[in-house]
Amino acid sequence: MVIVFGFFADSGERVKFLHLAAKKKNDSVWIPEFEKLLREFGSLEIYEHAEGFPESKTLSLIQNCDILITSWGAAPVPVATADEPGDLKYICHTNGGVRPVVPKEIIEAGIPVTNWGEAPAQRLAEAAFTLLIAVLKDVPGRVDTVRSGGWKPQDSVYGGGLEGLSTGIYGLGAIGRAFERMLRPFLPVVRVYDPYQKDIPETCTRVESLRELFETSEAVVIHAGLSPETEGSVNRELLALLPDHGIIINTARGAIIDQDALFAELETGRLRAGLDVLHPDTLPADHPARQWPNVIFTAHDLGKIRPLPGRPPGFWKFHRVCLENIRRFIEGEPLMYLIDLDRYMIST
């Protein structure tokens, strides 16, 4: 037996790993240490610019590996893999949304697929918490006042604190729960809408509809996954239920909100927002929303972790989840964060 990153792997078991990058491989995922440890388990082949491969070539490469590793920037898995998997035994999706990369037919065919589970929860919850505080306290407005020669904002309507703030959480999965734990010491009044969660913390009150969540909240923080059910679910009618100067925070997926409806509210100044995500996920350089004082845009980037200057990138939690699942698969143990069809359909 050899020890690999604290794990045990059978040195006689040589696994064939494959990664197909749509363009260039993602440097945040494919750090040298991660590649080295995978090669301790077996062989690793990485192909770049695979989005240009004929489907027959992509399918052949997948059929000749044991474990396909997908991640940010991976080329989509052909649907034909479901019926003709060849040697493929397992798809380990290291990070990001599963559905853009792995088709539903793969899940239905019974090929094991796992994702990163709770690995991103803390940092994405932290991003949402940061936006909520920054919007609530109008941090950008205060900075702009000082930089323009002023000192205290003279006519800002912004302010307030978390204590007693009626806060609605839309989606109480791993990220939503991490966010609620961060809020808890500040004593807000928290309501939750998530019809898929059987239990919620005692510090929260469950509501039975999105309408009730918006009717009873001063700030709504979105942590739901993007699915046919949630797409566009935060619409004009719900936004109108928020009080004047109410807050929307979204670090989940931009398409959950009717963006035209939200922008109409923001343009008038009635609502405030902190948006890490949009749909599409950028704004034209000349879009007037860039100048609105009541919204913060963070370019789907606030949850990312970067090394300090001069320090090389290191392991993320998702690397450890991936390696642990590979160890489990090789040794015949149950996999963590296995994606079944129900989970697939409600996940992003």
Image (tube, helix red, strand yellow):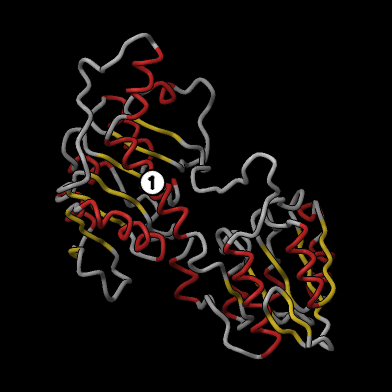
Q: Residue 36 at what x, y percent from top left?
A: 80, 66
Q: Residues within 10 Å of mark 1 (few under 14, many from 20)?
A: many
Left or right? Give the position of 65 relative to 172: right
Q: Residue furthest front?
A: 310
Judge from the rendering whether residue 174 lies leftward or rightward of residue 108; answer left or right.
left
Q: Residue furthest top?
A: 149
Q: Quadrant of residue 189?
A: bottom left
Nearest the viewer among 25 and 75 is 25
- Return the residue nearer the eye: 36 or 67: 36
54 versus 131 height, above or below: below
Identify the residue at horizontal 79%, vertical 56% (top origin): 50
The amino acid type of the residue labelled 1 equals Asn
Q: Position of residue 86 (x, y in %)?
A: 79, 81
> For mark 1, what is the residue?
250
Residue in view at x 20 percent, y 17 percent = 155
Q: How many marks do you count on the picture?
A: 1
| Callout 1: SS | strand
The residue nearer to you, when weighing 47 against 240, is: 47
Locate residue 183 relative to residue 311 in the image: left or right. Answer: left
- Identify the residue shown where x is 59% and y is 71%: 321
Where residue 334 sits: x, y (%)? 57, 87
Occupied quadrant, residue 91:
bottom right
Residue 239, image x, y percentages = 24, 42
